[in-house]
């Protein structure tokens, strides 16, 4: 599973739309989608995404408090 799929799955798992997730990390939905398609998120941005989802960022993974890992 690539980063794009992991981010989409993690957002869905936590009940957030991509637009709402983008807003929570201070990014426009358009910019978020472009970065998602191009796979250009920095590690810092991935950490922000995880925090916005209520998860922990482990390189290339999202770990949720209930033990779910995506």
Image (tube, rainbow, N blue to C red):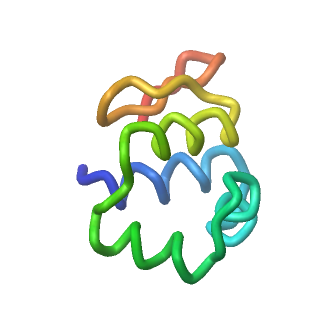
Quadrant of the image occupied by residue 51: top right
Look at 46% across and 52% down and name the residue there.
7
Q: Is residue 26 above or below residue 64?
A: below
Q: Is residue 65 above or below residue 16?
A: above
Q: Is residue 44 above or below residue 31?
A: above
40 horizontally vs 26: left or right: left
Q: Quadrant of the C terminus?
A: top left
38 horizontally vs 6: left or right: left
Look at 74% across and 63% down and name the residue there.
23
Look at 65% across and 17% down and name the residue there.
65
43 horizontally vs 32: left or right: left
Please, which residue is most extreme toward the bottom here? 30
Look at 54% across and 23% down and name the residue there.
56
Question: In this orientation, which residue lies closer to the viewer: 53 or 38?
Answer: 38
Quadrant of the image occupied by residue 14: top right
Q: Residue 12 location, x and y as percent? A: 61, 55
Q: Residue 61 location, x and y as percent? A: 37, 32
Number of numbered discs = 0
Q: Residue 35 location, x and y as percent? A: 40, 69
Q: Residue 19 location, x and y as percent? A: 69, 72
């Amino acid at each position: 599973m690539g980063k794009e799929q992991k981010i989409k799955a993690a957002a869905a798992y936590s009940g957030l739309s991509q637009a709402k997730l983008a807003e929570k990390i201070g990014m426009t939905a358009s910019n978020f989608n472009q970065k998602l398609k191009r796979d250009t998120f920095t590690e810092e941005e991935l950490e922000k995404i995880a925090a916005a989802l209520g998860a922990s960022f482990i390189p290339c993974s999202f770990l949720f408090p209930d033990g779910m890992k995506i």
